Each structure stands twice: as structure tokens, then as C-alpha cells.
Amino acid sequence: MQVTEIVSEGLKREIQVVLPADDLNQKCEQRLDEIKGDVQIRGFRKGRVPKVHLKKVYGRRLMLEVVQQAVEESSKQALDDRNERPVAQPEIALPEDQAEIESVVFGSKDLSYSMTYEVIPAIDLVDFSTISVERLVAKVDDAAVDEALQDLASRNKAYNGDPEAVAEEEDKLKIDFVGKIDGEEFEGGTAEGIDLVIGQGGFIPGFEEGLKGAKAGEHRDVTTTFPEEYPVDTLKGREATFAVTVQEVAKPVEAEVNDALAETLGVENLEKLRELVTNQITGEYEQISRAKLKRALLDQLDQAHSFELPPSLVEAEFNSIWNELTENMKKEEKSFEDDDKTEEEARAEYDDIARRRVRLGLVIGEIGDKHEIQVEQEELREALVQQARQYPGHEKMVYDYFEKTPGAIGQLRAPIFEEKVVDFLVSKAAIADKEVTREELAAPIDGEETDAPDADSKSDA
């Protein structure tokens, strides 16, 4: 095999690989030897077909297989020999001239092909012990627990039916209804004994509002319009009239924070409920603290590393961000002027974000490679189980998707890999705990919603 470098510009490479015809012919002869004992051709006993006849019948097909396998093996070997890691699968260009291809297949000409690719840049990792960040921590005080308990009580109100009550905000109604569009009933538009709390937004806009002032036993026609984003295509934007019968109007009774509330929630007493709520808030604080610590570490990694970025990765990341942004703006009917910026300014801003994501993704991948951080099969299985649990009754569909969709398992691997790298950094960096209030802990970080790196961008390559 002969390898010649044609282009070396920045991270872009193009090489030419030449495979001698003699090597290809030898491999084809080996394949003929392998099949001769199994081939049965009319006029010859099994295993007794002359090799020259075998070559006449099967030579072309076998040589095509040999060429395909030789390209796969030699392209990988060329990269290994050059100690280069491509960003993505190299683009391989075989000869375009059909006569040249035929000469290769018939074993009379060397096979010459080219490979074009971008390489992952060399990354000189920072000494992690020089990274110094603060970890924000907040104590769970009585005020936070009392507030959470009061919220639980407000979300678990009891209701007392009152035959004379007039329906108003926060009242609970039990209703029957029949919906019609253009005088015809439609699928899903009829129900009986449905509970509705006015003001909770459980029905399409205008429906709850149309029942204010109603009493038990009253019949009302409520006309409203399905929103344009309604999930049923045949109902989007359509005006419907609902014939509603109000069975009951019930007034809310504020639940007290006591043992009875705890029992309503399946807990033995208020003391045990306080303990559970405290543990839950503690877990929430720890998640926020972890997220902010991770952001601080990523900031340090970003500032500490500077290297040329593969243009294809930056372009792909920018396009992904930009397409999502413009789709959301279209749905929300917004423009760049609404944010006091031009499209050019927005493009520059999101190009910076794309570059940061790619840079961090490559750095995280390099850390994982250098320090042999692996995602275990058991971790992937657990992540898959957790994913399936989000779709009760459709677990098999989820398993089938990840089994049959190329690259899908990477959606599970990437965040696990990234968190394991963060754990590694935490173990090496200088971390100082800083006690803050819960308000300070919960304060948002500028840009955090658009800043997550693609941790698997390198490891997938």
C-alpha cells in the first residue's frame, strides 16, 4: 500500500491510497481457494471444479468483494499509520472512469482512491489541579419547608358541594358536555362526569371562562375556538360549541398543614411529611449546586484551551442551534428586532456559542480518552430503562427504537459520559464550598440555556 498526502491545510486532509494489483489478485485467489470445496456447478463434481472455471464464473463478484474489503481495511490502516483521528467518516472517492474500474476488477491495474477528511486537533490539556471553582451550597431552612408544605396543602384542597353556589375562579365543577362543529358532533368532544377547576387551564381557552356564574343543574352553550397549536389537526383553529350541563359546583376548602394532610398524601403523620419534604428540597438544592458547579468548570475549561476548531463541526453545531432558534421564533411570531438586535448580530452571537460547544465537546472527549473514562453497559441499560419508563405502556417501542436506530444509543451515552468527566474534574480541581441563600442558589446564570456542550462530538468520531 502506498499513501501520498495531497492536501494538508489546517485540519483538512486529502490523501491518495494505491493498492497494487498483485495484492488484490492474491486476495481474490485466496477467496477462490476458500469457496472451491463448496461450489457445485453442473458438469463437475462438488469440489472438483477447475480453478480457471471458478474464476470465470465467480471471479468478478469475488474481486468486487475483495476491492470493497481492501478499501475498508486500507483506509483505516492509512489513518492509523498517520496517527490521525478524523472528525467524521472520511469521504472516499474511487476512480470515476469506468474503464479504469474494470481494469482493477480484472486485476490488470492498481487500485487508486482518495480520502478527504478533517482531523481532530491536538489538544494540550490544562493541569486540572490549577482549576479553582466555588461550589454554591444552601441549607434547607424551616421557612423553605413551611412554604413547600403550604404549597402541598394548596394543591390538595378539599371541595364542598353547594347547590346554591355560583361558579367562580378556583371552584370545582362536575360537568357533562357535547361538543359540535358546524352542527356535527366530533370525536373526543363528548364526556360525562368530568371534573374541572376554573382557572387551572385544563380545557381549551375560553371554555372555563364560559362557565363562570353557572349553578348546579344549569345548562349552558359555550362557544370557543381550538388553538392553532392544538395536537389534533382536524380541530386546529376550528370554532366549536359545547352544550354543557353543570352537575355540581363545589367551593374550595383550604387544607391545613397537619396530620390529616399527611395522611391524605399517604404519609403517617406531619413529622414524617416534613422529613420527606426536607429530603426532597435537599435533593433539589444539590441538583442546582451540581449544575452551577458544572457550569463553572466548563467556563474554566473553555478559557484554558485554545486550538483550531474543525469547520464542519462548527457549521453543524451552528446550523442546529440556528434552526431551532428560528423555528421557535416562527412559532412565537417573534423577530430579531424584538430583542433589539439584527440578524447579523444574532448570527455572530450564536456562532460564538457553537464554537464554545464544539471546543468543550472536544476537550471533554480528550479528557475521557486520556484518562480512560468509559460508559459501562450497565449504565447504558439503566439509562435505557429510565427512558422507557417515561412512556408507560409503550416501553417496547422505546427499546425497539434504540435497538434499530443507528446512533440512537449515543443519545444515552453522551450525557452519561459528560457527567463522568465532570466527576473526574471535581476530583482533581480545587473546589471550595460557599454557603449562599436559596435565592442566590436559584438565581439563573446568563446563557446557561444555550451553553451545553456536545460531549460526544469527539468520542463518536
Image (cartoon, rainbow, N blue to C red):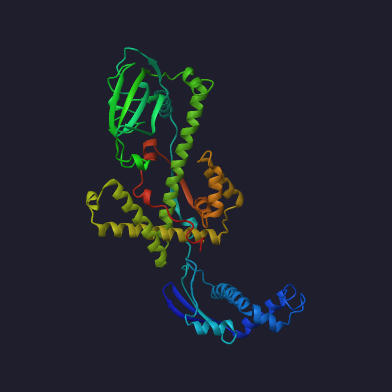
Is 239 located above or below residue 110 in the figure?
above
Looking at the picture, how far across and down is residue 61, in whole percent? 61, 76
Along the horizontal axis of the image, is 289 left or right of 227? right
- Decide which of 186, 247 is in the foreground and name it: 186
Looking at the picture, how far across and down is residue 150, in whole percent? 40, 24
Corner quadrant of residue 64: bottom right
Name the outermost residue toward the front. 43
Looking at the picture, how far across and down is residue 151, in whole percent? 40, 26
For the image, the number of numbered tags is 0
> Which residue occupies 33% across, 31% down?
180
Looking at the picture, how far across and down is residue 368, in whole percent? 53, 58
> Which residue occupies 39% across, 18% down?
159
Residue 171 visible (yes or no): no
Residue 11 visible (yes or no): yes
Along the horizontal axis of the image, is 88 left or right of 212? right
- Decide which of 131, 415 is in the foreground and name it: 415
- Decide which of 388, 153 is in the foreground and name it: 388
- Decide which of 29, 454 is in the foreground and name it: 29
Q: Quadrant of the N terminus?
A: bottom right
Is 23 located above or below residue 119 in the figure?
below
